Image: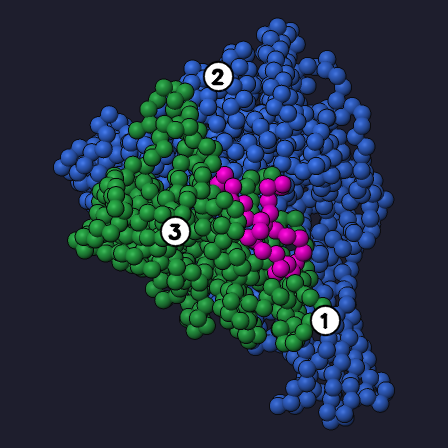
Chain colours: A green, B blue
Amino acid sequence: MKKIYTYISFLLLSGVVLAQKPIPADPQTKSIRITNVIIHVGNGTVINNGSVGFKNGKFDFVGENSATTSTSYEITVDGNGKHLYPGFILTNSTIGLREIDAVRATLDYDESGDLTPEVRAITSYNTDSKIIPTIRFNGVLIAQSAPRGGLISGQSSIVQLDAWNWEDAAIKMEDGVHINWPNRNRIIHPNQKDVDENTLKKDRNIAIGKIKDLVERAIMYMKETSHEEYNGKCEALKGLFTGEKNLYLHANTEKDIMESVAYFESVGVKKIVLVGAYEAYKITDFIKQHNVSVIINRIHELPRNEDDDIKLPYRMPKILWDAGILFTFSHDGDMEVMGSRNLPFNAGTTVAYGLEKEQALQLITLNAAKILGIDNQLGSIEVGKDATFFISDGDALDMMTNKLALAYINGRQIQLEDSQYYLYEMYMGKYGLKIK
Amino acid sequence: MGETKTDSKGAFYWNDAIKTDFLAYTHYSHQADKAEKLRKFGIGTVLTHRMDGIFRGSGALVTLADMESGKNILKENAAIFGSLEKGTATNDYPTSLTGVIALIRQFLYDAQWYTAMKGKADKNISLESYISLKNIPIIFKTQNRSDISRLEKIAKEFELNFHYVGSGEEFERIPDLKKTSSTFVVPLKFPQPYILSDPYDADMVSLEDLYRWDIAPANLHILDSNQISYNITTIGFEGAGDFFKNLKKAIQYGLGKDKALYALTEGPAKLLKVESQLGTLEKGKLANFIITENELGSEGFILMENWIQGRQYTIDGSAEAIDMRGNYSLVTDYAEVGGKKMILKGKPFSPSGEFMYNDTTKVSMDLSFEKSFVTGSFFLKSVNGYIRISAQIEKNKTWKGILEDPTGKKSDFSATWISAVEEEKKKEKTAITYGEVRYPNKAYGWKWNDLKAAEDKSYLIKNATVWTNEKEGILKGYDVITEKGKIKKIGQNLSCTDCQTIDGTGLHLTSGIIDEHSHIALSRGVNESGQSSSAEVRMGDVISADDINIYRQLSGGVTVAQLLHGSANAIGGQSALIKLRWGKSESEFPFEGAPGFIKFALGENVKQSNWGERNVYRYPQTRMGVEQFYYEMFNRAKEYAQLKKTSKDPVRKDIELETLCEILDGKRYITCHSYIQSEINMLLHVADSLEFKVNTFTHILEGYKVADKMKEHGANASTFADWWAYKFEVNEAIPYNASILTRVGVNTCVNSDDAEMARRLNHEAAKAMKYGNLTEEEAWKLCTLNPAKMLHIDDKVGSIKEGKDADLVLWSANPLSIYASVKFTMIDGIIYYSEERDKELQAFNQSEKTRLVQKMMQAVKNGEDGVPLAKKQFFLYECESLEDYDYETIQIVD
C-alpha cells in the first residue's frame, strides 16, 4: 500500500485559476488519518495530542496520538498541533432559499397563504448559492434550511454544504414542520396608532383557530383507513404524530410558549422544538418538565425590551445551560444567511458571558445535532460518525484565530476557497501585493 | 374658534407648512356651543389659533361671552404660534424633523433678508405678515421635552425668545429649562396607569412609562420650585371635571393654590401683555371672574358662575364636574327608602352607588349621570322589584326628583350629601410621594448626584496592558492617570494621591471605539427624503439623549459616534459627531470643536431601486443621473457664491447652497455612502473637476477595486467587516476589503450603521486579522485611531497619549478577542458605564419596577382609569429608514 505523508497547507490549489464556485469534492476513496491535533470532540471533552482516522466517510478511530500506531491508513496528515472540530451546524436558517435580500426574484422562503405545511425547503434549496462557500469557510458544514412566514410555514430540510444538487445535499429531506404561534403581546406599529385591543385579540384567536383546525383535521385524516380526497396539508402533518418529524414551534413570550406547548402535547405531537423562545429563560422549569428542546435566536442580538439586561442575549445561554435545557441557537434575523458565517463567533460570545468554551462549542455541534435528530451521525468527533469536521489554525470560536486549514464532509475534502477569496487574490495581484 | 382653510396659491411662501399669513382674528367667529364648553373650565378669555402647520400664524385673544364676534376680540394678534409638525401642507418637503427645523431656519433667514431688501424683493405675503407680527410672543408647541432644546438652538441663532406649549415631560430636564428665559404653557394631562394584573406581562411596561406616570403630576410643582415660568393650559381635556381633578392632583403634589391660580390668570395675561385688562380683580379691568363653592383646587370645589365682560353665566351640568362621592341621606314618602342612606364611592365623576337598606344589608345601584341629571335603579328584595329614581343635582350635591316603586307609584325623592366616604378621606390623607427624576428618566438612568460626583474624579489605572495606538505600541504593565477629563500621565509605577485607583492587572486598556457611521440617538426621521438634496438639514438638530442604545453601546466600548443622515438622496444632511455622554442633555452631546461633515449617497438607495414600483419618477433613477445631479447642484452653489460677491442688493441666504459652498471651500467634509466601483470613480471625477475633496467613502464595499484611485484622491474608507448579499450592489463585496484598502495605504475604519453591531465593533475590527491577515495593532486601529483621523479629531481622541481626552476602555482580555468584555467605558474622564455599576442598576431597575407596579395597581384600585398594556417596540434607524417623523412616541417593530 502506497502511503502519502503530508502537511496541512490551506491553499492546496494556489496558483491554479480558480472557478468562481468551489467544485464539489469526490467521495472518499483513500483512508486518511490525521495526527497531532487538539480534538474538540463536541460533547464537552478535548483530546490534546489527538489523532483521528476515517474510511469511507466515517471515523474509525478517535483518540490519543500514542494510540495511532496503526499503519492501515493510506494517507497520513500531520496536524501540527492545530485544532480539530466537528462541522458546525446552522439551525433554523433560510440558507439556499434566499440569495440577495433586496432582489425578490432570489427569494424562495415564504410561500403565500397562512397554512402551507406541504411545502418543502429541500426542493428550493440552491446548492449553487454563492453564500454557501463563504459560510463553510468559517466551519459551518451542516445546515437546516427552513421556510418562513404565515402560520404554518412548511417543512425544513437538513443539508450538508458541499453538493452538486439538492438530492446530494439532503441529510433529511423533511425533518420537521415550522409553526408560528401568534404573539399575544400587542405590538403597536407606528402606523397603527388607534388599533383596538379587542380587534387584535380577535385576530389572534382567529389565527390560532386556523392552526388548530388544520392540526385537528390532520388527526382525523390519519384515522381514516382510506382517503376520499388526497390532502397534502394533512399528509405533511402526519409525521408530527408518528415522531418522524419535529414540530418547530416558533413562540416567544412566556404565555405563548406555555399555551402552545400544552396544546401540541395534548393533541399528541411527539417532538417539540421551541424556536425563538425569547422568554424561555424565565420558564426553564416548565420547559424541562415538558421535555422540549430550544433553538434560541442569534446571540448577537439586541435585547427586545428597553429595560432588559443590556447583555441579555449574550447571557441567555448560560441561564439555559445551568437549567439543564437542551438548546442551540440559530442566526435568525436581519441578513441572516450571509451573516451566518459568524455562527462560531456568536458561540464565542457566550463564553465571555458565562459558558465554558467547550460548552459553547457543544451548542453548535452536538446539541444542534441532537435537536435536529441527526446525532447518531453528526455533531461530534466519535467513531462511527460521519467524518464531517475541519481543522483550524487556532481557536475556531474566535475571529482572531478562526482560520480553516482543511475541511471534510463525509470524508470528502472540500474546497475552502470561495468567490470572495478569489476576488481577494485577484485584487492583491492587481496592486502587486502579496498574501501573507 | 372659527377654522377656515386658506388657498395658498399666490404670493405666499413656497412651502404650505408656513402659514404666517393666517391671522386667526380674521377668521374668527364666536361659536356659542364651544364657548359654553370652555366656560365650564372657568375660562373667560382664550387665545385661539389654527393648529395647522409649522408657522401657524397669529392667535387672537377673545372672550367667551355670547356677543357679536367683534366685541369678543380683545387683541387681534396676541401671539405667533409654531410647531414642529407639517400639518396639512401637501408639499413633499419636509418629511422629517430635521427638515422641519431647516425650514424654520430658512424662513427666519428669509424674513431677515426681506426686511433688508426694504421693499425691493418680490412681494411675499407670508414673510410680510411674519415681519409685521414679530414683536408679539412666539409660542411653539412641543411633543416632548427634547423639542425645547431643539427650538432653543434656533431662538439663540436668531436672537428670538420662544415660549413653549409643553408636553408634560418638562420635569425630566430641569437643567435645560433653567437656561431659557421662556414661559412654559403646560397641559395638565397626566399619563394613565396601566392595568397590570398579569405578572407575565411585566416586561411589557417600561420603567420610563412608570417613572413618567409616577412623577408627571408633580411637573408644575417641580417647575415652580426651580423658578421656571409657567402657565397652565386646558388643552387636551374633553370635560372640565377631569381638568379640575388634575388641577387638584397637581396641588396635592405640591403646587401652591395661589401659584395654580396665577398660572391660569395673571401669568398668561402677562405673557400676552394684556395685564392691564385681565389677570387680576382690579378696578378698571374687565369684569371677568368666577364664583365657586370652595377654593380653586380644594376639596369640594365647584364652579358655580363664570362672569365674562360683566355677563353672568351660571354653570349647569356641574354633576359631570363634581366629585359626587360621599354618604347621602334620602328623603321620600316611600317607606322602604325614606330615611335611609346611600353611599357613592369609586371614581369621582362616575361613582358606583350602594343603597343601605339597613346596617348590614347593602344593595348595589345602577347609576348614570348626564349633565345635571342622575338616574338610578336598584333591586329591593323586601318588595321583590326594582326601584327607579330620576333627579336633578342642585347645589351642594343635593338631588331632587322622583322615585317610582315596583308597583308604578311615584313619590317625591331627594338626597342630601352628609359626609365624605371614610375610605376616600383616608386616601386623601395618605402622603403623596413620588420618585426622584433619573437622567435620562428611564431604566439605566443616572441619579443626578451620582452623575455630578462621577464628573469630579481622577483615576489611576495600574498595571494594565496599554494599547497606545502610538509608536510605543502595546505596553505591558503600564499605568495611566486621568485628570480633569484628560490623560495626564502614562508610565510605570505611577502614584496619585487624589486618584481613585483601578487595578488593571491582567486587563487591557485602550482608547474608546469610534463609530464612524451610526444612526442611534436621533429623533423623528433619519432621512429628509422630500428632495434629492437636503444639504440644509442637520442631524445635530434632532439628537435624542434618551436612546437606550447609547448606554448599550457604551457597554461595548464606544465613546464617539458620527450620527449620519440616511442615504435616500444624493446630497443628504449634515452629520452630528457626538460623545456618548449618557445622562447628559442633548446640548451636551456634540463633540466640541469637531469639523462639520455631510452625508452624500450613491447607488440603489438614491435611485430608489428598492422602493417599489411606484417610485420610478424622481430624478435621478440611474447612476448616470446621480453624476449630473452633482454637477447641477455644485454649479448652482458656485453661482450663488459669485452672486454674493457681486450683488449690490442683500443676497437671500440659502442654507442649502451655503452648505455646498462650505464643501467647495474645504470647510465641510463629505462622507459618501457608496458601494460599487463605477460610482466611486464617478464621484472622484466630479470632485476633482469641481475642485473639492471626498473625505470619506462609507460602506464602500467595492473600495478594494479602486483602492489606488481613492488613495490618490486622499479619500478615507469606512466599511463593514463582512456584510454583503443584502442587495444587488453588494454582490461583489468581500470581507478582505478593509485589509486590501489598508495594504494599499488608504486610511480605513470599520463602522456599524447598526445599533446591534455597534456594541461589538471590536469583533468587526478583529475580522481583518482573519480576512487579510492584518496585525493586531493594525486591526485595532480600524475602530479607534483610523476613524479619529478620518473625522479629523485625532488630535483629541483615537489613541492613549498624554494630553488627549480621557476616553478609555478597560477590557477583560485582548480587546480583539471574542472573549473580551468591557470592565468600564470612560469619556472625558467620567466612567459612564462599568460592569459593576450595571449590575447595581439592574437590581435598582428591578426594585423600582416592583415599587411602581404596586403603586400603579393601587391607583387603579383607587378608581383611576387604567389602560391596557401595549408593547412598545423599538425602531432602529439605519441608512434606508424612511419612517414618518410624526410617530416618535410610538416606536419600533421587528
Front of the two marks 2 and 3: 3
Vertical placement of residue B469 versus B299, above or below: above
Q: Position of residue B251 (x, y in %)?
A: 55, 58
Give percent across and percent down for residue A196: 68, 60
> Is A109 a magenta residue?
yes
Label 1 SS: loop
Kindly identify the amino acid type of the residue bearing the numbered disc 1.
Glu
Is B435 covered by the magenta stretch? no
Tell me residue A417's x, y (percent): 40, 36
Bin the neighbour count of mark 2 within 10 Å (Cα to Cα): few under 14, some 14-19, many 20 and up.
many
Q: Position of residue A198 (x, y in %)?
A: 67, 64
Q: Which residue has dot 2 on it?
A: B693
Q: Are marks 2 and 3 in contact (CB under 8 Å)?
A: no
What residue is rendered at 61% in x and 51% in y?
A110
Q: Residues within 10 Å of mark 3 (few under 14, many from 20)?
A: many
Disc 2 on helix, strand or loop?
Answer: loop
Q: Label 2 near label 1: C-beta < 8 Å?
A: no
Foreground residue, A240 or A207?
A240
Amino acid type of the residue that numbered disc 3 sits on in the rendered structure? Asn
Are both tags, 1 and 3, on one chain?
A: yes
User: Label 1, on which residue?
Assistant: A228
Quarter of the image for the N terminus of chain B: give it. top right
Q: Residue at x 52, y 26 (%)?
A: B676
For residue B656, what is the image quadrant? Answer: top right
Q: CA distance from mark 1 to mark 2?
A: 75 Å
| A310 or A289: nearer the viewer | A289
Mark 2–mark 3 distance (CA, rounded to whole Å): 55 Å
Q: Which residue is mark 3?
A: A410
Dot in front, 1 or 2:
1
